Amino acid sequence: MAVRSGLRRATVFAVSLLAVAMVTVPAGPAAAAPQSSPAVVAQHPYMGWSSWSLESTNFPGVDPTGQESWLTEQHVLAQADVMAAKLASHGYTYVNIDAGWLGGFDAYGRPVPNATTFPDGIRHIADYVHHKGLKLGIYLAVGLYTQAYGNGDTPIFGTTNCHTRDIVYPDLRTTNGWNIGYLINYASPCAQAYVNSIANEFAGWQVDFLKMDGVGPGSGQGDANHDNTNDIKAWSAALRQTGRPIQYVLSWSLSHNDASTWMRYSNGWRIDTDVECYCGTLVTWNNSVKERWDDVVQWIPDAGPGHWNSLDALDVGNGTMDGVNETERQSYMTLWAIEAAPLFSGDDLTTLDGYGLSLLTNDEVIAVDQAGVPARPVSQSSDQQVWYAHNSDGSATVALFNLGADTATVTANWTDIGVAGPARVRDLWQHQDLGRSNGEFSATLPSHGSRLLRITPESSALALPTNVHGTASTASSVSLAWDASAKATGYDVYAGATRVASTTGPSVTVTGLTPATGYAFTVVATRNGRRSLPSAQVPVTTPGAGGPVGYEAETAGNTIGGSAAVYSCSGCSGGAKVGFLGNSGYLTINDVTAPVAGTYLMQLAYVDGDSSRTAIVTVNGTPFELPLPGTNDNNWDVAQTATVPVHLNAGSNAIGFGNPNGYVSDVDKITI
């Protein structure tokens, strides 16, 4: 398993907590807790600034006495001054204090700020930023901090007979991404009372935002002691009962298996490890900006009003400090914008350069983000990628990316992105109309370069179905799925010129097919007698009469080399898998037999407890890239599946898995 930057943060965070002592202060009254529902928050991705990038960097002079030492009251207020003066008019609102503000806990186990670095307290900062029309965010790790537990006799504020020993398990099992907190037992009513007491404290400080960190399943953890779904439900209720509209977001690398819980009880979640490099700059392209192009994909359908996919800090404002060049800075912000991700800078706003300020204040690009329509890739089989989203006005947002090491041409084909007929093209970064284009748009991009476009069709024709793909096949059937077309009420499915199915939804299984036969499927959207142009063709060859056929990765006749080896896997077919693929490790599944030459649907069973990993799949010597989504819970005993088209020759074929530049998911089995 690869070491990710979020794990490096664990060391920093744990060390900082060693200095946290129990602090006894007068309790004071509890914050008022009206029962009226708070205003709806997070209808659009939030915009602002966060302190962690500056706290975590080794850039000379930023953290004078070690990581987190940058964070002081004066520094936070200075960031608020710049945001109010230069960024607020473009939508930036939140000033978020990350880890490092905590100075200890009061006599009721509630957090208090570090009196040395925050001498006037959090309420003072909140009043200051509110006076400037901004909002304030604060940070906690999930669970009961071990220092707040005391000896178990710490009373819970607002109760008569609840103590910290009453809200944890007797064995004091630890939780969160760093194991620096005790797992709270919500079977005890005292537990909710404790969480409420902190939520009321934050509301009394006039806090507008809470980031909860180290949440599992996720954050590199996945066992029962690191299942914090009950914490998230309890905190959601606690924040609601304050009556104050506090945006609530989760971190880091949340497990997609629990997406429904995150969506119901929070306003957003980190889909990945820290973007920071923990090095002499804030980030680098390789560690870990570029990972977001792969890691966000499985989360795209989950983003929407009230809950958004966070890609982490947007460190594009200072070329000297950021660690990415100008070309990369634009691509960095382009991805964040097209994914409707929260736009929060991690830069020192007092040192923004002119180019960085122009990126952060480009209102056409910001409008793409705030529209809240996440884009999806046409294909990720190479480093030259087209991402698109359909807008409510009938236009499409299209981003072109060259993620490779050399200059390359990237082409957006209208059929692939669902655009019918001629269309007008506008460059959103340059605020420039590029004229009319019919069928496609191409751009030659430098390494890691990008273009961001709005494509506006000149006709009112129905949008084409996009992302048509095969999901399963048998000797006599093929299952297809696609993205729904705006305003369509039905779809006709064709095999060549023959209509073979009609449906009202974006999926269908075509039956009555012939074994070992190639078909070319297209889909046409329909509405009240109107018809779209056909989608892009999807070739699928049905397996032979005995198919589909499975091939175990650990079979003795396969080629397993380098660091790769066979490992036991309780959730895998046959109880085994091939792991430690990538870098030097490789696997070739030999003697994959096809009855005729054609494009077959390969179901790949794989195991990935990480965010995602990219395999280079080689079919008879021809390679393509295959990013595979992970579970983010460090569970390497449960197989997932992905369906991938592969072109096979008649007879025997060889299918290889590896990647000389990174780790690959473990392979359990393929079925063709």
Image (spheres, rainbow, N blue to C red):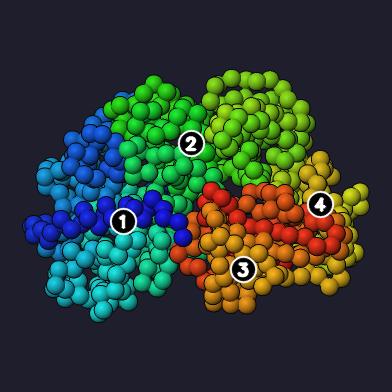
Q: Amino acid at mark 1?
A: Ala
Q: Which of pointers 3 and 2 indicates the residue nearer the eye? A: 3
Task: Say what secondary structure mark 4 lies in.
Answer: strand
Mark closer to the chain start, 1 or 3 = 1
Mark closer to the chain start, 4 or 3 = 4
Q: Residues within 10 Å of mark 2 (few under 14, many from 20)?
A: many
Residue 380 in the figure: left or right of residue 234: right
Task: Say what secondary structure mark 2 lies in.
Answer: helix
Q: Which residue is mark 3?
A: 668
List the single residue furthest toward the bottom: 170
List the single residue furthest toward the front: 562
**Residue 238 location in percent, x, y?**
31, 61
Mark closer to the chain start, 3 or 2 = 2
Is residue 229 visible in the rendered image? The answer is no
Q: CA distance from mark 1 to mark 3?
A: 31 Å
Q: CA distance from mark 1 to mark 2?
A: 25 Å
Q: Residues within 10 Å of mark 3 (few under 14, many from 20)?
A: many
Task: Say what secondary structure mark 1 lies in.
Answer: helix
**Residue 522 location in percent, x, y?**
82, 49
Residue 13 in the figure: left or right of residue 231: left
Residue 630 in the figure: left or right of residue 194: right
Q: CA distance from mark 4 to mark 3?
A: 26 Å
Mark closer to the chain start, 4 or 1 = 1
Q: CA distance from mark 3 to mark 2?
A: 34 Å
User: What mark, if any, has residue 539 been given in the picture?
Assistant: 4
Q: Which residue is mark 2?
A: 332
Q: Which of pointers 1 and 3 indicates the residue nearer the eye? A: 3
Q: Which of pointers 4 and 3 indicates the residue nearer the eye? A: 3
Is residue 11 visible in the rendered image? The answer is yes
